[in-house]
Structure formats: C-alpha cells, structure tokens
Image (spheres, rainbow, N blue to C red):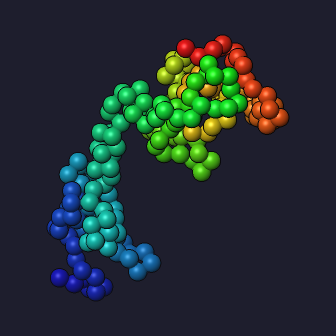
Amino acid sequence: MKTAHNRMDLTGQVFGRLTVVGYAYTKRNRSYWTCQCLCGTTTTTMGGSLKNGDTQSCGCIHRERAATLNTAPLAERFWAKVDKSGPTPTCCAPHYGNCWLWTANTTQQGYGRIEVENRLRQATHVSWFLLYGVWPTSDLCHVCDNPACVRPTHLFEGTDAANQYDRSLKAQGAVLIESCDGPVQ
C-alpha cells in the first residue's frame, strides 16, 4: 500500500529481527522508519536498507557475533596466529633463534594487530604482555628488525630514537650479541 507521499508503507512488516512500527521522516528523498527489534530496542533506519536486507537488527546481531568471536582466551587466540618457523635474522647472534611471524591482520608496514577487549592492539605488545604479564610502558623495538616478528625475546622496550640508532648500527654491519634480558631461552 502506498502512502499519501507515494512511498510504500512498511508498517507492520518484519525484516530480520526488526518490526516496522511506523514512518519516522524523509531525508534526501529517503524514507526512514521506526522499528522495534526483538531485543527490545527501538531504532530508526532507512527503508531501502530494510528492503534489501542490509539492516536486520538494531545492531544486536553484530554485537552477539562479535562477542562469540573473542571468547577464546587471549593466549590461545594469539598463538594460533603465529608461525614459529620464520627466518633466522642475520643481524642477531644465533642464540636469539628464528623469528615468530604474525600471520593475521597487519598494518601497511607489516606490524601485526589483534583485537583485545574491543580495541586493536599491536601484536608485539600482546606478545610482550603474554610473557611478562604487563603491557609495555613505551615503544617496542625488534632486535631482528622484522615487523612481522612477535617473538617476545626479539623485542625490547625503547624510544623511536633508540630504535633508529639500533637500526643504523645493524645497517653498518653490527651484530646484536646480547639484549638487556640476555640470551633467549
């Protein structure tokens, strides 16, 4: 049934979890409708989004799915995304061992990212947290200069200036022998 303004009346129709309660307003030639979600929330959404299936709830479906994605313990989720058979860096003494490479979401620069408590965190920081039980207080630098590496013993806290200095020494052929923590386990 068409309304007086030549728009299809969606009142009473059900789209996913939403039941259209009534017309709300028109903006930029698009009709918006007030809907009641099965979860009890009232929301306003564009009629076209209802009809084409883009909007099926007040957002509760997304929140429910997101909650189930991150139910595994952090360590389990984290280490499932790590390949421990990465290359052995040439800029470090052999006792540092090979790189452990992040295989999931990365930045354009190749640094890993993972969601922790609804916030994207750097994978290197999560690796540090899982080993030491505290979040790093400053930037983390790589002894291996490999952005994808999350091996905690390849990481050290430092400033950007310290990281640049470390990188320049390695570019001149220096090989890192020890870290502040000593050889890797």
Residue that appears at 63% across and 22% down? 94
Residue that appears at 30% across and 62% down? 55
Q: Is residue 108 above or below residue 123?
A: below
The percent coordinates of residue 153 (x first, y second) are 59, 22
Q: Quadrant of the C terminus?
A: top right
Judge left or right: residue 27 versus residue 99. left
Q: Quadrant of residue 31?
A: bottom left
Which of these two is toward me, 87 or 20?
87
Can the viewer see residue 135? no
Q: Quadrant of the N terminus?
A: bottom left
Q: Is residue 42 above or below residue 8?
A: above
The percent coordinates of residue 143 (x first, y second) are 67, 28
The percent coordinates of residue 123 (x first, y second) are 53, 35
Q: Is residue 150 above or below residue 31?
A: above
Can the viewer see residue 81? yes
Residue that appears at 79% across and 37% down? 171
Residue that appears at 41% across and 26% down? 75
Q: Is residue 179 above or below residue 19?
A: above
- How many numbered marks are there? 0
The percent coordinates of residue 37 (x first, y second) are 24, 54
Which of these two is toward me, 127 or 69?
127
Q: Quadrant of residue 11?
A: bottom left
